[in-house]
Image: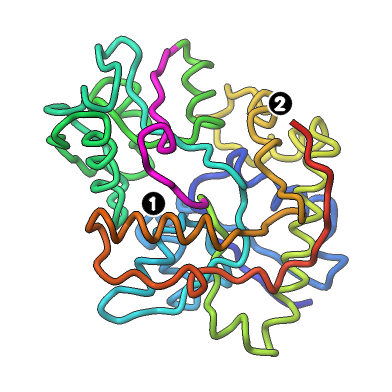
Amino acid sequence: MDKITLALDWTPNINHIGFFVAKAKGYYRDAGLDVQIIDPSADNYEITPAKKVELGQADFALCPTESIISYRTKSSPFPLKAIAAVFQTDLSAIVVRADSGIYTPSGLDGKSYASYKARYEDRIVKEMIRNAGGKGDIRIEWPEKLGIWETLVNGTYDASWIFTNWEGLAAEADGLLLRYFKMEDFGIPYSYSPVLAADEQKMNDKKFRDAYIRFLSSTSKGFDHTVDEPAEAALILQDFIPEIDSGIDLNKALGRTAAAIHSADGWGYMQSEKMQAFVDWLKQTGLEENPPAASELFDNSLLTSQKRTITE
């Protein structure tokens, strides 16, 4: 059995369902893989998932496209590369409480934002505010990562960035009404998030490449099964959800997620045009002076094409 370690970007949630289904259904085992899934709660996010790949502590990490750009442009570059997109459409948003009196991103001027301290995150939020007619004058705070959602719930901070198909449902379960600001509605051609990332040198090394291809093929089957048998998939995921999220309706969460899982080619495929649009936007807005070309950021070659009929 080839050992594989996957570092999740957050505690287990609906975005990770295909991985847990693939493991529970034996798809990894049948492919000769012993897959360990780890999440940030083990070290309270002391080391990010992408950093674990750089340090050799994980084979794969879930992270946003911005992390790929960041690792390839830092002072000591690391060849992190996206090898699959978990979703084809952006399921994230900047949110505020509905009772906050903030009705557009421009209303965030003079307010506070709970940040995950990602390289481009804070500046993306400020650009959204400017695109909505504001000044981008928002106070950025960096609370403990795994506690960020609670700071929005209790009103400590005015806004944060969430996944609508997870924290959005957590809010509904608690009776908390939110107002959502989507990137695409405010002139930001946001790319893929999360993506499955790996060390480019390893993925091109025949010692690892075959196992990586088998991992992606098995993961694809996990997401396929999730779409085809959602009730069973939700039951599988339920065993891994932390107690704090136990009130979230997994079937409802999957209902908001399923349509974003596949492209016409199957699970995971990324489009150069979509990547390049985001890279160009980062450069045009001055968020990244010399960003790499989209072709340097992702590689579909490890994916096995499994075309599916996409329905609305």
Whether 180 is among the magenta residues is: yes
Task: Name the amino acid type tagged 1.
Answer: Asn
Say which of marks 1 and 2 sits in front: 2
Q: Sequence-wise, which precedes: disc 1 or disc 2?
A: 1
Q: Nearer the viewer, residue 108 or 216?
A: 108
Q: Position of residue 39 (x, y in %)?
A: 52, 53
Whether 151 is among the magenta residues is: no
**Residue 71's mark?**
none
Q: Nearer the viewer, residue 78 or 310?
A: 310
User: Local crowd at mark 1 within 10 Å, few (<14), some, or many (≥20)?
Assistant: few
Task: Name the amino acid type tagged 2.
Answer: Asn
Give the residue at mark 2. 251
Quadrant of the frame with the N terminus = bottom right
What kind of element bears circle 2?
helix
Q: Position of residue 293 (x, y in %)?
A: 43, 71
- Give me the residue at 80% from left, 63% from top: 305
Give the residue at mark 1. 44
- Which stretch is magenta? 176-192
- Give me the residue at 17% from left, 30% from top: 134
The Cα atoms of the two marked residues, 1 and 2, are separated by 28 Å
The answer to whether 153 appears left or right of 141 in the picture is: right
Q: Position of residue 205 (x, y in %)?
A: 63, 89
- Give me the residue at 21% from left, 27% from top: 108
Residue 35 in which image quadrant: bottom right
The extreme bottom residue here reads 206
The extreme right residue here reads 30
- Give me the residue at 80% from left, 47% from top: 224
What kind of element bears circle 1?
loop
The relative height of residue 164 versus residue 190 in the rendered view (above or below) is: above
